[in-house]
Image (cartoon, coloured by chain):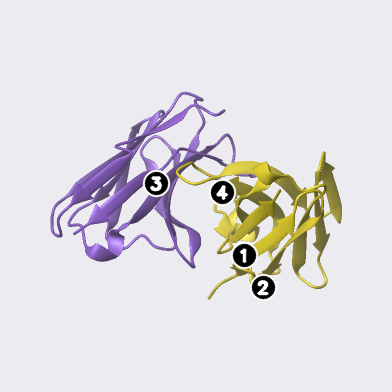
């Protein structure tokens, strides 16, 4: 039972354009969401997070949007750069699972020069 | 970068042998976690620790045990390795388990069980 899903295994974007990565969840107890970025042969690095009391959080080129009614979140990267090419994981926590993150399968983003 | 190291970084072993992976942190964080990463599954929690000698199971704990005798070290043991345990293993740490629940990851250990 996959409680956090990233339905797009890969995404290809031109440099300078917007990248939109999507994530859906099924557990209504989740109230804190994170995005991690992972380069090959490295560990995931924290990118941005959002609490369920907000619907948007920005950090530079990265913005996360949360739609609680749809149980959907998205990560926008504007403008996309070749260095953004990586695997992006969304993760969720909440309810009795605090301290335990549930991850999606990941989306491979490729930004072409 | 959070001070997290994992050893070994790569290991090849044979089915049925015991294997221990080590995670070491210099951040004095209370919480430590072991995940495995497999294609199509993202990262899945194996075990976690909320203090010295305090550990609990994650969603894929069968075949794994852990120990934490010091704040800085969290060991993952495969008592008798199987080919299904071929994976990349990541250790993570966090200061708290409440909101915000940000975990910081080590560089990973690639384990191959033949």
| Residue that mark 1 sits on | A10
Point out residue B94 in the picture as x, y percentages from the top left corner: 55, 38
- Do discs 3 and 2 share a chain? no
Q: What color is chain B drawn in?
A: purple
Q: How far separated are the C-alphas under marks 3 and 4?
A: 12 Å
Point out residue B80 in the picture as x, y percentages from the top left corner: 17, 57
Front residue of B112 and A85? A85
| Residue that mark 2 sits on | A26
Dot 3 lies on which element? strand
Seen at 62% across and 69% down, the residue is: A5
Q: Chain of mark 3?
A: B
Residue B41 visible to an observer of this rendering: yes
Question: In the figure, is residue A5 to the left or right of B43?
Answer: right
Q: Earlier in the sequence, mark 1 or mark 2?
A: 1
Residue A54 visible to an observer of this rendering: no
Question: In the figure, is residue B114 to the left or right of B107?
Answer: left
Which is more foreground, mark 4 or mark 2?
Answer: 2
Which is more foreground, mark 3 or mark 2?
Answer: 2
| Residue that mark 3 sits on | B55
Chain seen in yellow: A
> Is the residue marked by circle 4 packed among few (<14), some (14-19), or many (20+) residues within 10 Å?
many
Dot 1 lies on which element? strand
Q: Are marks 3 and 1 in contact (CB under 8 Å)?
A: no
Q: Chain of mark 1?
A: A
Q: How far separated are the C-alphas under marks 1 and 4?
A: 28 Å
Front residue of A85 and A89? A85
Q: Quadrant of the N terminus of chain B?
A: top right
Q: How far separated are the C-alphas under marks 3 and 2?
A: 27 Å
Disc ID at residue A99 = 4
Dot 2 lies on which element? loop
Q: How far separated are the C-alphas under marks 4 and 2?
A: 18 Å
- Do discs 1 and 2 share a chain? yes
């Amino acid at each position: 039972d996959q409680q956090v899903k990233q339905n797009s295994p890969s995404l290809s974007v031109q440099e300078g354009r917007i990248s939109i990565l999507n994530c859906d969840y099924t557990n209504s107890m989740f109230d804190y969401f994170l995005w991690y970025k992972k380069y090959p042969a490295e560990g995931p690095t924290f990118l941005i997070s959002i609490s369920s009391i907000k619907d948007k959080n920005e950090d530079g080129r990265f913005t996360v949007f949360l739609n609680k009614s749809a149980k959907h979140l998205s990560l926008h990267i504007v403008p996309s750069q070749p260095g953004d090419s990586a695997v992006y994981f969304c993760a969720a926590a909440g309810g009795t699972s605090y301290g335990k993150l549930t991850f999606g399968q990941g989306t491979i983003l490729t930004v072409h020069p | 970068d959070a001070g997290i190291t994992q050893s070994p970084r790569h290991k090849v072993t044979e089915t049925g042998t015991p294997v221990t992976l080590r995670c070491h942190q210099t951040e004095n964080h209370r919480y430590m976690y072991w995940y495995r990463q497999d294609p199509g599954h993202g990262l899945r929690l194996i075990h976690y620790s909320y203090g010295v000698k305090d550990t609990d199971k994650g969603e894929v704990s069968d075949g794994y045990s852990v120990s934490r005798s010091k704040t800085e070290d969290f060991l993952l043991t495969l008592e008798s390795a199987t080919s299904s345990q071929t994976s990349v293993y990541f250790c993570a740490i966090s200061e708290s388990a409440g909101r915000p629940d940000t975990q910081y990851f080590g560089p990973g250990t690639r384990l191959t069980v033949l």
